[in-house]
Amino acid sequence: MNDVRTIVLVTGVLALLTAATGAGQFLKRHPDRGLDPAAVRTFNLRLRGWWILCTVLAAAFWLGTTATVVLFGLVSFWALREFITLTPTRKGDHRALFWVFFLFTPLHYVLVGLNRYDIFSVFLPVYATLFVLARVAVAGDYKRFLERTAKIQAGLVVCVYCLSFAPALLQIPVEGQATVGRSANFRLLFFLILLVQFADGTQYVWSRMLGRRLVAAAVSSNRTWEGLLGSAASTALLAAVLWWAAPPYQPWQAALAGLVIAVLGFAGGMTMSAIKRDRGVKDYGTLVAGHGGVLDRVDSMCFAAPVFYHLTLLVAQ
């Protein structure tokens, strides 16, 4: 974590957060600037949440690969809890959920930490899926069986399986080295997280500035086609500029990865918004001030992480 590129990358992000915080406090103290006070308040709350998230993530990075994998495991556990809590369950689901939370989820992250891609790539989508179906069936409650088991399986795949590909980036040999868990791998993970957050933010900004055509008005009232295009272009440009922070990518490959991350992050946000609209709620939770629940913050990451992981494997070969 002490190489020059890592220090430059982290310092740059901290400088941007510091500048944004200063601007937010200035706007808060000068409401006569013509900006919506509610928007300024939301902006400052989000900045506070981002500082907390960055601090926790930086601490995990400093402690090493194991701590980072554990952190993402805890995030997955909480995100899955929010996902399952959002919709009602029946008594016949409870024992299956017990094994999902306390056996399959932690064991999956153990396999990620051990770099057993051959096993963790099929562990949840195959074996956990079969277990959930059989366990709920054995409970003897057949009412809305497919609906109930599909909800558990969807939550397990999105909140645990897909998100786990983010810390799995720490296990990919890069820069021609056979070892893993070095600064290059942490920069690669940081690169993904930064681009996902940047794509979310620029999508909102471009939609507010130029948005005219909503993608799906019934699902989201602030996600527009103009916002998606602006976010994809902005994220691709940032990725190309930061290509040096993401081995083994070249500038054009990093730009393509940024484009993919922006589009998939957008798809993740839309998907999770559709679920929230179906359940009649605004956020999945209130754990992080200004950010809603944990799942509200990692929905884009859940969709972007597995594709970025496999793109990185392809480029690294």
Image (cartoon, rainbow, N blue to C red):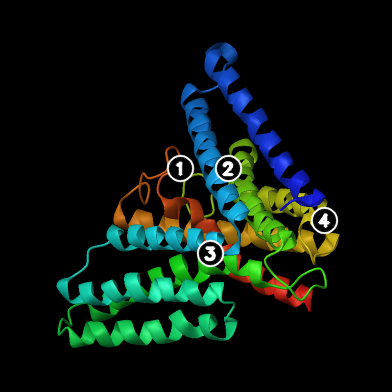
In depth, the one of 282 and 184 nearer the eye is 184
Q: Secondary structure at mark 4?
A: helix
In depth, the one of 26 and 233 nearer the eye is 26
Q: Please name the residue that numbered disc 4 is placed on.
A: 244
N-terminal-most mark, 3 or 4: 3
Q: Quadrant of the C terminus?
A: bottom right
Q: Secondary structure at mark 3?
A: helix
Q: Nearer the viewer, mark 1 or mark 2?
A: 1
Residue 204 is marked as 2
Image position of 190 with respect to 91: above or below: above
Quote the CA–CA distance across marks 1 and 2. 14 Å
Q: Nearer the viewer, mark 3 or mark 2?
A: 3
Indicate left or right for 34 with 74 as reference. right
Q: Please name the residue that numbered disc 1 is placed on.
A: 291
Quote the CA–CA distance across marks 4 and 2. 27 Å
Q: Nearer the viewer, mark 4 or mark 1?
A: 4
Q: Inspect the image, locate mark 2, and give the three-letter code of the amino acid beneath it.
A: Tyr
Quote the CA–CA distance across marks 3 and 4. 24 Å
Residue at (69, 55) in percent of width and height: 191
Neighbour tally class for label 2: few under 14, some 14-19, many 20 plus, Cα within 10 Å: some
Neighbour tally class for label 3: few under 14, some 14-19, many 20 plus, Cα within 10 Å: many
Q: Please name the residue that numbered disc 3 is placed on.
A: 69
Q: Do the residues bearing badges 1 and 2 touch, measured as CB atoms within 8 Å?
A: no
Q: Inspect the image, locate mark 4, and give the three-letter code of the amino acid beneath it.
A: Trp
Q: Secondary structure at mark 2?
A: helix
N-terminal-most mark, 3 or 2: 3
Neighbour tally class for label 1: few under 14, some 14-19, many 20 plus, Cα within 10 Å: many
Indicate left or right for 59 with 142 as reference. right
